[in-house]
Image: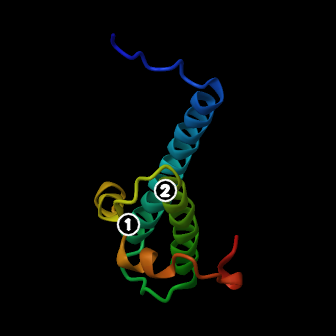
Amino acid sequence: MRKTDPAPDPIEHELRGEAANSLGIADRRLREAMQKIVAFDAAHPEVTASDPARFKLLCAASDVLWSYIIQKEMIGAADHDLVTETFGVTREVWRLMGVIHPDARP
């Protein structure tokens, strides 16, 4: 006699759906944050890394990255190299992740 799978738990199903939705939102936020840095760099090629406006964008992106990494790790997906490749996350952003910069807050 073949054993059948138990009926899916509706609460577990709902939680997985919410986790997927939350990750999708974090995905879009990270993509947008990295695009802002790329756009800023293209519009201001003469600006150095220490420019306050650029630093503010880097800090914002690092906050979004932190949230994204937490979301991924909560669902068991921790391939950070893929995050770098997919979103173009730079070393600057990785280094700032988890660091609080009160002067760079919007």
Question: The residue under label 2 is which amino acid type?
Answer: Leu
Mark 1 surroundings: few (<14), some (14-19) or many (≥20) residues within 10 A:
many
In the rendered image, the residue lying farthest to the front is 1
In the rendered image, the residue lying farthest to the top is 1
Q: Position of residue 3 (x, y in %)?
A: 38, 17
Q: Is residue 97 above or below residue 23?
A: below
Q: Is residue 26 above or below residue 83?
A: above
Q: Is residue 67 above or below residue 2?
A: below
Counting residues from the N terminus, which is met first, the one under dot 1 or under dot 2? Answer: 2
- Return the residue nearer the eye: 88 or 16: 16
**Quadrant of residue 12 within the rendered picture:** top right
Count every numbered label the image shows and give the total.
2
Q: Which residue: 54% across, 22% down?
A: 8
Mark 2 surroundings: few (<14), some (14-19) or many (≥20) residues within 10 A:
many
- Return the residue nearer the eye: 6 or 24: 6
Q: Secondary structure at mark 2?
A: helix
76 left or right of 56? left
Question: The residue under label 1 is which amino acid type?
Answer: Val
Q: Position of residue 68 (x, y in %)?
A: 51, 58
11 left or right of 42? right
The residue wearing badge 2 is 30
The residue wearing badge 1 is 89
User: Pointer 1 and pointer 2: residues touching (CB < 8 Å)?
Assistant: yes
Q: Which residue: 36% across, 64% down?
A: 80
Q: Position of residue 34 (x, y in %)?
A: 44, 61
Position of the N terminus, as image quadrant, is top left
Mark carried by residue 15: none
Using the numbered discs, state the Cα–Cα distance from disc 1 to disc 2 in whole angstroms: 9 Å
Q: Which residue: 65% across, 81% down?
A: 100
Q: Position of residue 106 (x, y in %)?
A: 70, 70
